[in-house]
Image: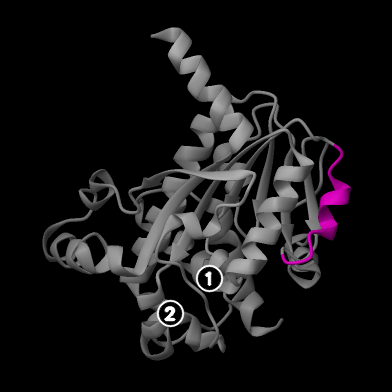
Amino acid sequence: MNSVNKTLYIPLYGKSYVSKKGLFLYDKKAEEIWEAEGFSLKGKSKSKWLAYYMGIRSAVFDEWLKQEMVTAPDAVIIHIGCGMDSRVIRVGTENHKWYDVDFLEVIEERKRYYANTDDYQMIAGDARTCDWLTAIEENKSAIVVMEGVSMYLTVDEMQNLLDRLCSHFERLSLLVDAYTSFAVRMSKHRNPINDVGVTEVYGIDKPQAYQTEKLAFVKEHTMIPQKYVEELKGFEKFLFAKLYAGSLSKKLYRLYEYQKKQSLNSNLSNCCLCV
């Protein structure tokens, strides 16, 4: 795998680690794959603090997705940059069609542990080209999650991807985490992804940077909710809160929700009618 693809092992390790400790999320599949692959991580990428962060981040994405699936029962789910993540197992399809998307070599690796079904399909494709969208026949409504992906795409590449998604679907909701420009500068010295050979990343300082003519920023979400910090004890809880849940964390990472503008306007209209 190339360096970017190898980054998938960092969150995989994190989810395996917290699952074994009974923290934040239950992910036996991550435990199984990590044990079988035996991939060697070193340095910061195998830090327990980073593992806690990865586990909480995934739990936050899972929660948002579950809520969106209830409000949009006809939507397809698209997980862009799925890596070896078992979100489809943790969340469940609940009668939604689910598509996991990643590079060809990642999907080939993934097929060793996952199988396509009527409700679940793996698609090989590059988020930057969007050719993979032709494999998705549905075009009404989509819920898209991009966890740990945007930092590998330029702003232009992100806007192109989001424009293409908006053109394909009548309604669209998206949750994406992003680096800040400060995080990009810091990553040259202290980013765990350097341990697997990644040196080029991108960030934004305002959520409007990803807006397009068709897509609007809705709100910012809390990356590290306090309820998850409370699962830790003693010094671990204190230090994690300082490193990953405080003001320093907000200078580095942000979590943004977007909707296709037509969908957003419709939701606002519905809210007005209900008042």
Which residue lies under the disc numbered 2?
A: 184
**Residue 102 image point, x, y percent:** 72, 62
Assign the N terminus to one quadrant of the image: bottom right
Instruction: Categorize mark 1 by other alpha carbons within 10 Å: few (<14), some (14-19), many (20+).
Output: many
Which of the 4 quarters of the picture holds residue 238? bottom left
**Which residue type does callout 1 highlight?**
Met
Look at 35% across and 53% down and name the residue there: 223
**What kind of element bears circle 1?**
helix
Residue range in magenta is 128-137
60 is higher (above) or lower (below) than 267:
below
Q: In front here: 229 or 158? A: 158
Q: Measuring from the top left, give residue 81's x and y in whole percent.
A: 65, 61
Residues at marks 2 and 1 touching, judged by CB atoms closer than 8 Å: yes
Q: Is residue 126 visible?
A: yes
Q: Which residue is mark 1?
A: 151
Taking depth in this image into account, of 274 and 225 the one nearest to the observer is: 274
The image position of residue 67, as x and y in percent, is 49, 30
Q: Dot 2: what SS?
A: helix
